[in-house]
Amino acid sequence: MKKLLLLCVGALFAVGSYAQTEEVVAVTVDEVIAKRPSIKGFVSNGFWDNWEISFGAGASSMSISNLVFKDAPDSFGKRIGFEANFSITKWIHPVFGARLQLAGGRFRNFSTPTQGTQRTPYMFLHTDLMINFSNWAGGYRADRAYYAIPFVGFGYQALDFTDRVHELGYATNQEWAFTGGLLNKFRISKGWDLDIELKGWLFPEKDLPSTLSNGGTYAVGYSATAGFTHRFNDRNWRREIPQAYTDADIAAYAAAVAELESDLAAARDKQKSLADQLAAATKALKDMDGQPKEVFINGSCAVFFALNSAELTQRNEIVLGMIADEINSAPANKTYTISGYADKETGSEEYNLKLSEERAQAVAKYLESKGVKADQLIVKGYGSNVQPFSGNIENNRVVVIK
């Protein structure tokens, strides 16, 4: 019997160990730790979660295949015994669980009017497959108040094992038994349930005392008990979160973010370098007295542009920054003419006029961004009809400030 007990306990812990799963890291926008799903739709729990310890007590009875109890007077009342039980249950899913139960008590049987009542002590150790029918049929709900849990199982039963029975001349009887029943659970608090269990188990009759069996083939035990269950640690279940993106999508996203971060770092380095160059150029143009050097040559300054472009280059911005410093240090009532031009070798007359105006406006806006007042600037575009410089046509893609 000790070997059987160890076997049943090992079987239960093997089922419990199946529920213990490894944690894996799922990379999303936020870091999420998820567990491997044990059955589709739910996430399996840890080994120490969803354990239950139960105890109960109630009435028991036994029916023998070849004995007609109606022939005995007051037979029903004389066949009611008692049972107490203790159970350990591990749920591996909202619907499925495993239980190990030790039940013990005493059968009472009125065999014949002359032989009177037979009292048969018993102990029954069995392991059961538990099926939460309420969660199966109605879907999992953490706030459900009633659970119907049918179960089936098998185990080992010992009868007539006490010293008192041995003194009466009966030997201990041991046999395998198959059991099934319905466990009704009523949720009374977060960690406690009220249980009402209806159970039956089938076992051979051949080893029963001869006054009861008389050569029959089987017997059936019945019990109805009430008790309480305490549930431990994490008592609820989490649903599986579907993966919104594939691993390839996540890898591509991570690569794009890394590339953008690299580009941003390079742009910051370039910006710092340009700022250093501007500071160095400004410092080089200062006199010993700290006054800015003259940047206008014979009262004018030229800013050159690329072909078909009105965009200021970095070199242009450095020059215009120095021009803005000189204008801001000059008398406030002094005005300056900004004249835009285009080379006559490319583009139509209409296009070149518009391009020259855009170049002049670009220069004016940059000077204004550096503190120059708009009413100090006169802006005009001359297109390609006027060519301020001779020689290379690139010299006429220019804005002249006077």
Image (cartoon, grey):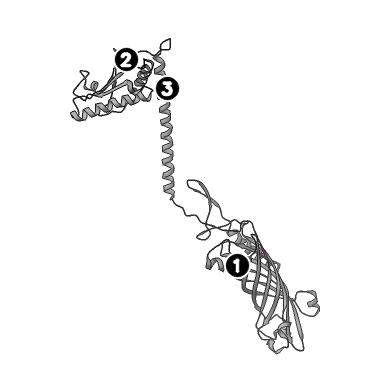
Left or right: residue 351 versus residue 67 is left
Closer mark to the observer between disc 2 and disc 3: 2
**Quadrant where the N terminus lies?**
bottom right
The circle on residue 276 is 3
Q: Give residue 325's quadrant in the image.
A: top left
Q: Give residue 65's quadrant in the image.
A: bottom right
Q: Nearer the viewer, residue 237 or 286?
A: 286
* Mark earlier in primary sequence (1, 3): 1
Local packing at callout 3 (Cα closer than 10 Å; few below 14, some 14-19, many 20+) is few
| Mark 2 residue element | loop
Q: Between marks 1 and 3, how big is the CA–CA gap?
A: 76 Å
Q: Give residue 14's quadrant in the image.
A: bottom right
- At which x and y percent is residue 359? 28, 26
**Quadrant where the C terminus lies?**
top left
Q: Between marks 2 and 1, how big is the CA–CA gap?
A: 93 Å
| Residue at 43 percent of width and 39 percent of height | 258
The circle on residue 296 is 2
The circle on residue 146 is 1
Q: Nearer the viewer, residue 92 or 337?
A: 337
Asked if residue 393 can be seen in this view, the reply is yes
- At which x and y percent is residue 131? 57, 68
The reply to whether the magenta stretch includes residue 232 is: yes
| Mark 1 residue element | strand
| 209 lies above or below 347 | below
The reply to whether the magenta stretch includes residue 356 is: no
Asked if residue 307 can be seen in this view, the reply is no
Q: Which residues are magenta?
A: 229-237
Q: Between marks 2 and 3, how big is the CA–CA gap?
A: 24 Å
- At which x and y percent is residue 285? 39, 14
Local packing at callout 1 (Cα closer than 10 Å; few below 14, some 14-19, many 20+) is some
Instruction: Check whether the beta carbons of the residues at disc 2 and disc 3 lie within 8 A of each other.
Output: no
Left or right: residue 164 versus residue 62 is right
